[in-house]
Image: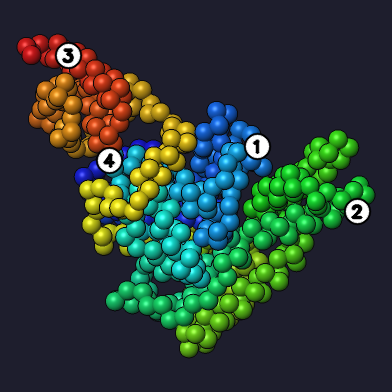
């Protein structure tokens, strides 16, 4: 991930959208919101037994923990890696990884975030999310309702009254909002914290199990391992049905004697989820009732959440409101909208120089969870990094180790005052060292980068024919 060329303007209060299927970070770069690539909301372990986030674990999909958003704050215990975790701890793994990504992007520590939460979430879930953020050493500047985040991400390009239909992997929120010069006013909301794309996956999995039972005369529904396999396959094929008329669930070697290929048409899938779509429209009606507005008052529908890519949903919404297809906003990425809104709201808050939480056990909990996680992917070697000649040169941080302060200062002088032609290697070495200092990397890492900077400065000095 490359750092913005205008690093000093990067705002260090970030927006985070915690989704059932994926999580996304947004950063204000001084002129626009930059949405980083989404991270699957999957917590697993690698071959060494370390926790990895956003990757299918080496032990297989069935050993992953996914969909934690649905049970956050429920008191449910999660069995993972041979031990029991609280739901907030699994969520904290996600937030620690998202914090890492943001810090890699901005080139320094991040301690503050605006985090989205389902509008239908209760106080218990909101408290659990704050506790998870504390375990990740993040100051929560605001818990932002998903529907407000979506409206903020949409922006006020046309003041008016809008319906927000937010259908993600695990939750559904509907809201009626009025957007004007003063911002976003929420007129009415309704929703279900257990309605989303996960339910559609379950419908497909149940269909596949019925087909297998009819064809092979065996009931595999009680085998948890097989159910998980089928459900993962169902999720993949569900996504394909947004662009294809039919798909096939490929399920080899379910047992020693059973392999299956289950065809599924888009029409068949739509029939399965019709009751769930009807429920969502009932909630939309409840939101309008709470807002005191009728269908005729709705000018456009804003879609948020990956499940709104399903063509049936867009067709039903247009029919429900009597709108044209262009009034169902498909030009905005529904999987980025909430994060974009959170990033915009985050501009209103000042960043803190450190984590402010003082609750007992937060620091020790953070250290324990981080110790269980695999190290992030290593930075590419300095020689492979391509420096951006337009990027400003930051001064050596105050925390620069004394052994390398002099060479860092002299490198800064060379790069900031003279022409940079021919200094690409020195620039890469210097920026790599400064970022490591800002991120408080381990002493061994700082020594390695400091020695590389010293060697590169000596080569540059020799080539210039100057005397140290």
Q: CA distance from mark 3 to mark 2?
A: 75 Å
In the rendered image, the vertical position of residue 117 relative to residue 12, given as above or below: below
How was this image coloured?
rainbow
Residue 321 placement, left or right of 439: right
Badge 2 local density, few (<14 within 10 Å), some, or many (20+)?
few
Q: Which mark is residue 60?
A: 1
Q: Which mark is residue 458?
A: 3
Q: Residue at x 24, y 17 (%)?
A: 451
Q: Which residue is mark 2?
A: 214
4 or 2: tag closer to the N-terminus: 4
**Element on which disc 1 rests:** loop
Q: Which residue is mark 4?
A: 108
Q: CA distance from mark 1 to mark 2?
A: 28 Å
3 or 1: tag closer to the N-terminus: 1
Q: CA distance from mark 4 to mark 3?
A: 27 Å
Badge 4 local density, few (<14 within 10 Å), some, or many (20+)?
some
Residue 383 placement, left or right of 42: left
**Element on which disc 2 rests:** helix
Q: Depth check: give the residue in front, 411 or 120.
A: 120
Screen quadrant of the C terminus: top left
């Amino acid at each position: 991930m490359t750092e913005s060329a205008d690093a000093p303007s990067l705002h260090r209060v970030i927006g985070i959208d915690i989704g059932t299927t994926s999580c996304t970070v947004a950063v204000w770069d001084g002129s626009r919101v930059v949405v980083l690539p989404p991270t699957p909301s999957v917590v697993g372990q690698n071959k060494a037994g370390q926790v990895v986030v956003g990757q299918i674990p080496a032990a297989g999909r069935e050993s992953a923990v996914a969909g934690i958003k649905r049970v956050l704050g429920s008191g449910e215990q999660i069995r993972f890696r041979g031990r029991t975790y609280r739901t907030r701890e699994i969520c904290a793994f996600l937030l620690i990884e998202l914090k890492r990504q943001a810090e890699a992007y901005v080139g320094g520590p991040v301690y503050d975030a605006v985090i989205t939460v389902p509008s239908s979430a209760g106080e218990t879930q909101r408290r659990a999310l704050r506790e998870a953020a504390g375990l990740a050493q993040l100051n929560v500047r605001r818990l932002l309702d998903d529907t407000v985040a979506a409206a903020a991400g949409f922006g006020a390009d046309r003041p008016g009254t809008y319906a927000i239909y937010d259908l993600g992997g695990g939750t559904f929120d509907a809201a009626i909002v009025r957007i004007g010069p003063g911002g976003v006013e929420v007129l009415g909301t309704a929703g279900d914290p257990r309605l989303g794309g996960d339910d559609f996956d379950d419908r497909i999995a149940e269909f596949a199990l019925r087909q297998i039972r009819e064809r092979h005369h065996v009931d595999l529904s009680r085998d948890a391992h097989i159910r998980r396999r089928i459900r993962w396959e169902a999720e993949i094929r569900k996504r394909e049905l947004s662009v294809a008329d039919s798909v096939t669930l490929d399920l080899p070697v379910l047992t020693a004697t059973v392999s299956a290929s289950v065809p599924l048409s888009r029409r068949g899938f739509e029939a399965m989820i019709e009751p769930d779509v009807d429920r969502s429209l009932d909630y939309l009606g409840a939101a309008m009732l709470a807002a005191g507005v009728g269908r005729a008052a709705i000018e456009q529908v804003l879609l948020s959440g990956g499940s709104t890519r399903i063509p049936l949903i867009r067709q039903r919404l247009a029919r429900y409101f009597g709108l044209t297809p262009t009034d169902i906003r498909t030009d905005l990425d529904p999987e980025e909208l909430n994060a974009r809104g959170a990033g915009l709201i985050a501009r209103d808050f000042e960043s803190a120089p450190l984590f402010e939480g003082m609750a007992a056990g937060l620091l020790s909990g953070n250290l324990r969870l981080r110790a269980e996680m695999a190290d992030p992917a290593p930075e590419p070697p300095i020689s492979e990094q391509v420096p951006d000649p337009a990027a400003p040169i930051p001064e050596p941080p105050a925390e620069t180790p004394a052994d390398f302060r002099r060479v860092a200062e002299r490198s800064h002088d060379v790069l900031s005052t003279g022409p940079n032609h021919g200094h690409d290697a020195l620039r890469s070495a210097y920026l790599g060292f400064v970022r490591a200092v800002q991120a408080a990397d381990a002493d061994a890492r700082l020594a390695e980068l400091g020695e590389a900077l010293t060697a590169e400065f000596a080569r540059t000095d020799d080539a210039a024919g100057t005397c140290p």
